[in-house]
Amino acid sequence: MPDLIEQLHAEVPTLEIDRSSSLLRAIENDASGLKGAPPIAAVAPTDLHELQDLVAAARRIGLPLVPVSSSGEHHRGDTLSTRPTATVSMRHFRKILRVDRRNRVALAEAAVDFPEFTRAVHAKGLRPMLPLAPRPGKSVLGAYIEREPTIYPRFQWDMADPLLCLEVVFGTGELFRTGSAAGPGTIEEQWAAGDAQKNPMGPGQSDLMRVIQGAQGTIGIATWCSAKCEPLPSRETLHAVASKTIEPLVRVAYGLLRRNHADILFLANGHTLAALLASDRDTYLRALPAAADWYLIFSVSDPPEFPEDKLRYVWREIGGLLAAHGLAETATLPAGTTDSLYRRITRPDLSQGLPYWRRAGLPLVREVAFQTTLDRAARFFPAVEAFARTRWASSDVLAYVQPQIGGRVCHVEFDFAYAPGPPEHEVEREAALLGLARELRSLGAFFSRPYGPVTPVAFEKSSTAWIVPKVKRMFDPDGILSPGCLDVPERPRKQGGAHALQ
Amino acid sequence: MTFAVTSASEAVQVPRFAGELHHRVHEALAEIVGKRWVETDPAVLDTHAWQYIAEAVTGSHYMPRPVAIVLPANTAEVAAIVRLCNRLGIQYKAVSTAFGMWNAPARADQVVQIDLRRLDRIIRIDRDNMYAVIEPYVTGNQLQTEAMKVGLNTHIAGCGAQCSSLASATSMMGQGMDGVSMGFSNRNLLGFEWVTPDGEIVQVGSFDVAGDDFLGDGPGFSIRGIIRGFAGALGGLGVFTRAAVKLYPWYGPPAFEQNGVSPYYHLRIPDHHTAAVLLVNDWRGMAELGRRIGEAGIADHLTRNAPSLMAGAVTADNNEAVEVYRIPMLHEMYYNLIIVMTALHDDEARWRRKVLRKILSDLRGGMLSNDLSLGGTTALLGFVRTVARRIGWGGLLKSMPSFLKLMMRDAERFGWGAVPDGLPSMMYQAVVRAGMNMRGVFRFAGTFWTAMGSLVSWDNAIRGARVGAQVKAKYIRKGAIVDDGGDNAWGGLYEAGAYAHLEELCMYDQTDPACKEAVTEYVIETNLACIENHCGDSLNAVGPTAHVLFSPVCMDYDKFTARIKAEFDPNNSAEASFYTDPNFVPPEGAQARMAAVLADRAPVSVDNDHIPQEEVETRRATTRS
């Protein structure tokens, strides 16, 4: 394999190539505890042309590539590979190309992280659509291209939001821009004509953005994206409601979502809130005894015009909604207040020193996440509780329920933080997690973003599984991009098809 | 015409029907669905061939005849028909409510038309999670009627409430007057069932594991990106037999109070609802009006109708329409948006109205609405002043007799009680029920075509409207199309103003060869103007002929669409005349027609004076950096 890197150097002499063993060891593992094949180099193109040259050269010499936009430790195994590869670090793509207040949109290159993005859009009177307290170093494009849920269901019109347009180099080496960014005209000519890369659809009669998104880097390498932002309100207040069970909170959430009264809205168990607010493991553990089982977190913002007129009826409705379900607001949260939580989840630029909440102060975490509807969410909890008690030997499970697309669907996530153990435990742990995923699927969990070992579980019953390798081949015929990700085997078609003609 | 197709590859791949094969197809189809549900009678075939703008392909009102029409009862039968066509090496094209030439084959006697009208169920409406699962023949009207009973509403595309909601979401386009609160059809699609071009049944999204279609994205990337873009495959990539579409809150009654006799109806605007014609002074005012209403989140329906279109929509015959259009006050109401705001209670209605009045006041505009409060009356005065700025107080006075006449007519038809909100009520019906979309465009000359209409920012959509009107003026001067004032841009904003569209309508006589020829050139010329002025990829950018123009200036997109078609439909079984064809050969005479257009271009001069200057400066500075 090393000679491939020499060949690559010969093909793209200006390309930055790093083969230092410490770096490669760091790339080989991530904080999920999963291990990949050792990478053979990390390469860092400096601009679009060099990236295109890199992909073209990689095709010629058969060098697999794993694109990585975020910095810091990864957590899902999606940057690990099943075979030796070159990691493509996009770290030189860190410009914010434009923030457009009038059209509520910002264009950011692949390596721009949330703190930087937040600062830039705030400066123009906008707010970014944020995932729940993204980890340090998480790329904006990286989160959006993976369909990570954001905490703002009200502003999510489509599962693809807030991602709008993309510039991408496909595995074929072809350059493409999606949506209205495709043209006519250059991006600058479009700006001059008043356009703003806000339409994510097309161009033409296919939506390649949707094919790149969720593909875990197997279709192309994105260089920049345009992302939906919303006006920064003059005042936004965060509120919490606690409950022994999730069901009444779900009913309140439905009420708020239906009326578009809340901007931020999610549900979380006490462990999750404690992890979000605690500065370390000890604080987290100390906060747990006082934590309620479940919380509904929501924010209410001032509208730009006549806020007092609107808030009067909004709060009257919210009060009625809470009273109808025997609930009341709570001001105290485990390890903090609603004010500290608000700062934690809306200002990644001010939270950079805090540990990544999903790990709850431990070194590693495994995430099990899927989509369902809010009214179905509770049906999965008994299985997870039983699993935690009997197979994980800890009830220390973070649960997070994030309504999406205005509440029509929700992301349900369980995070199992843990400390590394002996190797034999790893095998056991993997088997147990896989068993849990299967059980959840049998209960109706839709793993729409499957990573690593969960991938086969997600596709086992899927009638669209055969489409995955077919589409990957169209855009990456040599299979050089992110080998091992979305690895769905080719299989004979069930019925009909071209073979029927023979 | 733009959509006309002649494909060398298809001519080779698809054999013309011979008598024996014809018989085999008929027999085989009957085996699948039963004899009763296969039709080959030419008279019946022609009922399917009669299509809006068929003249673009054939020169007549009829598209080419299909070889047979087959009416499957369920998905299994659809898949069996598709597999049969693959086996026999013939093509098929599915239709549901079938509005427009795209629904018919482009060549005679080679295509089986799959008519999906027996798949007509609303499978379920999920009130809490706000979506409906529907079959292809469910219309916007049917879905809306049922959704409103449980406090929900649905996006209805601009083609009207008589069209299939599923077809719009999976296969067509999806602009609409409710876009500001209910989006665009592409983005309302959740999970769906797809009979792939070679006959495999797949459930896209959550159905396989959850038994429900609440989500259509994943596992992994989204197959929604394969089956459609800003437009769908228009029948060129298999058949869609079930889909979940998003629904939205409805703060109105389960049914409307309506009286009158067709075609004259009066609908009582429900409590707490507002319907209004908003008026500002120029394009710059329009740009601000749309932007601010979108951002304020107060509108449920928001649409721009030029005066001529408004005259058509609110009247029932051409004499009446012309009479209304000639009223000086209405004739000059160019800078308008029609808005409907719903509300759950009076407090909410008051807040929405107050915000709207503030925006209008800031822009020195006004509104004519059903709001008869003091605030509403003040806004009405603003409306009158805005009109007067354009036509003078003399023009306003001249308008009064005609207005009084209209009021008298309303009183005769519906009683004096209906007079105060006569126009708002008409607008409300037209917008909320989407039942009058077509009478504003077909009636004047027989048919219409449309141009520009890209999905872009509101600022850029206005730019497109201004460009389109200048191109159209040339054809009006030639006497080839209806003189509708030139600017007849219809459209609106989507998703709280995130993006927008304005399409330039053009009404013409499809029985007159000179008109048909001129409209062909109009479409070509507006496509060119769209490209040259960076107004996005026009809504005419569907089908191989348009891709020849747009694909090279939009990242060669058709190359990728063609790759999808080849991969999923190796036998080219799904008729794709309006989708993609890698071996497309422009029709005979296309070059000469293009040369004619290029030799006589309409002068177009457009700047961005509708965008506040400071915004333009910011953009230039950003661009330079």
Image (tube, coloured by chain):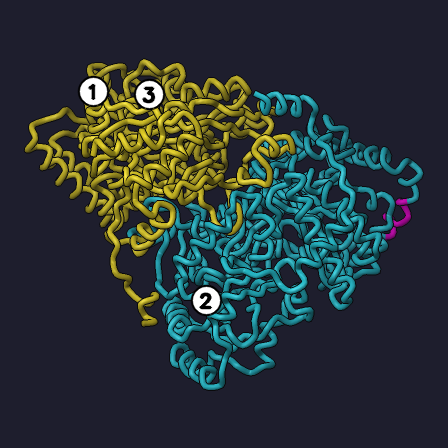
SS assignment at label 1 = helix
- Whether the residues at callouts 2 and 1 have beta carbons within 8 Å, the answer is no
Relative placement, left or right, of B279 versus A257 is right
Nearest to the observer: residue B245 or residue B515: B515
The location of residue B8, given as percent across then percent down, is: 53, 66
Q: Are marks 3 and 1 on the same chain?
A: yes
Query: Looking at the picture, which amino acid does disc 2 mark?
Result: Leu
Comparing marks 3 and 1, which lies closer to the viewer?
Answer: 1
Q: Residue at x 37, y 25 (%)?
A: A14
Q: Local crowd at mark 3 within 10 Å, few (<14), some, or many (≥20)?
A: many
Q: Which residues are magenta?
A: B399-405
Q: Is residue A48 above or below residue B216?
A: above
Report which colour depicts chain B: cyan
Nearest to the observer: residue A12 or residue B17: A12
Chain designation of label 3: A
Kindly report the secondary structure that dominates the magenta region of the rendered protein. Answer: helix
- Whether the residues at callouts 3 and 1 have beta carbons within 8 Å, the answer is no
The residue tagged 2 is: B119
Q: Quadrant of residue B607?
A: top right
Relative placement, left or right, of A167 versus B330 is left
Chain letter for the yellow part: A
Q: Is residue A26 above or below residue B116?
A: above
SS assignment at label 3 = loop
Chain designation of label 1: A
The residue tagged 3 is: A136
Q: Is residue B21 above or below residue B100?
A: below
Residue B575: numbered disc: none
Query: Looking at the picture, which amino acid does disc 1 mark?
Result: Ser
Q: Quadrant of residue B74?
A: bottom left
Relative placement, left or right, of B170 versus B358 is left
The residue tagged 1 is: A22
